[in-house]
Amino acid sequence: MQKRVSLKDIANKVGVSIALVSYVINGQEKEKRVGAEVVKKIREAAEELNYQPNQIARSLRMKSTKTIGLIVADIANPFFGHLARIIENEASNQGYTVIFGSSDEDQFKSESLINTLSNRQVDGFIIVPTEGTIGQIRELAKKKTPFVLVDRYFPEINASHVVLDNYRATYDATVQLINEGYRNISLCAYELDLIHMKERIRGYREAMQYNNLAENLHLVEIRPEHYKEDIGKAFDEIVAVQKESRALIFATNALSVYGLYCIQKKSLKIPKDIAFFGFDGGESFDLFDPPLSFVQQPLEEMGKESFNVLLNLINGSSKITQVMLSPALIVRNTVNT
């Protein structure tokens, strides 16, 4: 095995002290007033000898690993996959590496990931919290670990977060359908004790109530672990009871996709037989005939903002930053516009 090149090897080659080499390798040449010519010689020698710094030792000295932990709810979900890519790109642009983990909406897996990443000495976390993890987030805050919550947050904890205005998302989608003449509007949402889903439900409810359609309100709450079974049953009920002016809003991408499957299975036509409004969109929404209407989240902004808020915390800021982003409605001919 080839011997690892050390600072001493570089120092001997250039004819300077080990301390001087250390200053240059660690980017402290200006602070230590090392001459430009000496800096050049040290860097050339390091390159010639193929010097590879010991990252663990360097991290201990610099008190930074230049890594962050990203925990999403389900990496297989296109929404989280795209969000992770944006965060990774932004981190890379600023010299950071992202270590990924997927909690799969499981509080115990989330706890394990936080512990594992903490042991890896990540500089901070970006977390999509799941049900039952409020204690884990409180513990991070107690330890003063830099972290940012994204997509979801806990109102009980005063912590930095970057989220969508979920109330506005479903409120606007519902009003759009009402303005197009629909009266029997149903919302399919997950049965979750999480703020983002509660706000999506609240937006739908209040849009129906404010437009004097409270008696037509039809909320279908889906158990995440049985979403295919529950959507199938709910869809049968909607089709049987609502004969005209029917519209469906789906509160997540996964629910939207399976809802489409149910619509096709019943041989219903969009928007002739039923109007459709999905969430998050995606390539499959564009390929569908006709292309589908959906609520669009500003993913690029969400990903970049969450990393930059975290970076400020890593760099010593104690400011709590809470960002709420505006949704956009992508309205196509899957409603009667």
Image: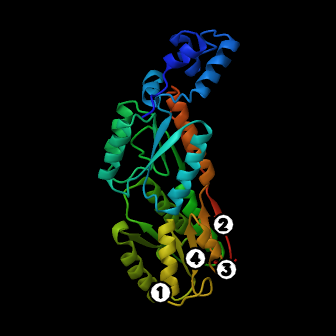
Q: Quadrant of the C terminus?
A: bottom right
Q: Name the residue at 56% across, 52% down.
A: 85
**Could you say whether the residue bearing mark 3 is in a helix, strand or loop?**
loop
- Indicate the position of residue 180 as horizontal and vertical percent values: 66, 76
Up the image or down, 38 lies above or below 321; here it is above
Residue 74: name its quadrant.
bottom left
**Could you say whether the residue bearing mark 4 is in a helix, strand or loop?**
strand
Q: Nearer the viewer, mark 4 or mark 3?
A: 4
Give the mark nearer the N terminus: 4 vs 3. 4
Residue that badge 1 annotates: 239
- Indicate the position of residue 52 as horizontal and vertical percent values: 52, 30
CA gap between label 4 and label 2 equals 12 Å
Give the mark nearer the N terminus: 3 vs 2. 2
Disc 3 residue type (three-letter): Asn
Determine whether label 4 and label 3 are within 8 Å by CB.
no
- Indicate the position of residue 105 as horizontal and vertical percent values: 37, 57
Question: Is there any visible trace of residue 321 in the rendered image?
Answer: no
Residue that badge 3 annotates: 336
Question: Is there any visible trace of residue 185 in the rendered image?
Answer: yes
Q: Report how many numbered discs are placed on residues in the image.
A: 4
Residue furthest to the front in view is: 1
Give the mark nearer the N terminus: 2 vs 1. 1
Q: Nearer the viewer, residue 47 or 121?
A: 47
Disc 1 residue type (three-letter): Val
